[in-house]
Amino acid sequence: MISGYATFSEFIASDPELSIYRSFLALTSRNLLYQQSELLALEHRFREFDEDDSKSSANLDILLSAKCWETFANNAAHGEPRESERLETIKELRTRLREYQESLILQRHILGLPRPQKRAFRAFQGWFDNEKPFVGYGHDMLKHGEDFIALQPSSDQDLLTTSLQNLAGRLFPGVRHETTTDVKYYSADHVSRLATILTVLLASLLINGAIVLLYIVKSEHIRLGMVAIFTSLFAGSLAVLTDGKRTDIILATAACAAVMVVFVSASGD
């Protein structure tokens, strides 16, 4: 098969993490600015309409048309130039405003999409550089590497899982992609399961080791120092082994410290 859109799309579809695309943030920002300028011009036109009404407030027909929508719409339907122009401007406002607001909502959604993970982007970039699927403007698509987003990145973002994924890519043969042998696939479930097992084992060893040492050591001063050390180790392990938020890590660390302090107090009595 000729390397092009067909092969590139098959490569992207081979793994959800490879759904990586340009976000075109600069062009989107420019489009929003253009739409904003169009609305500014419309806003200025309505301000001129209002000023014209104020100058002609003594005219009963103009005053009634400014206060009553039915009168205004009837005058516009009968071809009154003044009201017809305003009605066309109102219709244009609805269209422009809807387009602008939809663009804002879409941009907000796009800005919330994450950047691709380094491991997935390296595979994406390696395939692109080797196969060169595009010519024309698409051949240097990766020149703007900071402008890419990932539609479905890996859910496991903690350091341990990321390290295991990188290690698996180096040590295990995996399944090679049919067009580029440099790209390998392996089970993410196996990596996630191994990360869970290691996390449980290391957390158990840390807590059990703290309990044993606090039981053996009798000096209160040393015990307090050990509580501080093990609490710090526990907090550090949570940051490395899990993808928990800072608030969760602080709460879990406080609970661990409280349990150790209670253990020290009870064993000292």
Image (cartoon, grey):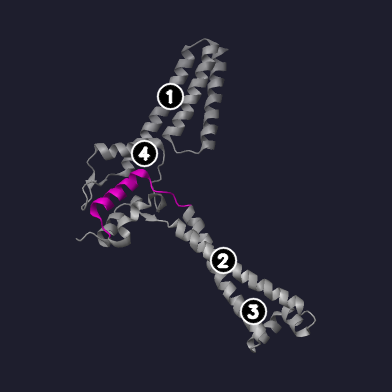
Q: CA distance from mark 1 to mark 4?
A: 22 Å
User: Residue 169: which quarter of the image?
Assistant: top left
Task: Relative to 133, say whether 64 is above or below.
Answer: below
**Of the numbered discs in the image, which one, if any, rests on residue 162?**
4
- Pair 2/4: label in front: 2
Disc nearer the start of the sequence (4/3) = 3
Distance Cα–Cα, label 1 vs label 3: 74 Å
Tag 3: amino acid: Arg
**Relative to residue 5, is residue 252 depicted above or below?**
above
Quickly name the residue at label 3.
86
Mark 4 vs mark 3: give the one in front: 3
Q: Could you tell me which quadrant the C terminus lies in?
A: top right
Mark 1 residue element = helix
Residue at image point 68% right, 71% down: 47
* Residue 102 pos. (x, y %): 52, 64
Between disc 2 and disc 4, whose residue precedes? 2
Number of the front mark, 3 or 2: 2
Q: Which one is in front, 248 or 77?
A: 77
Residue, disc 2: 37
Q: Which residue is mark 1?
A: 206
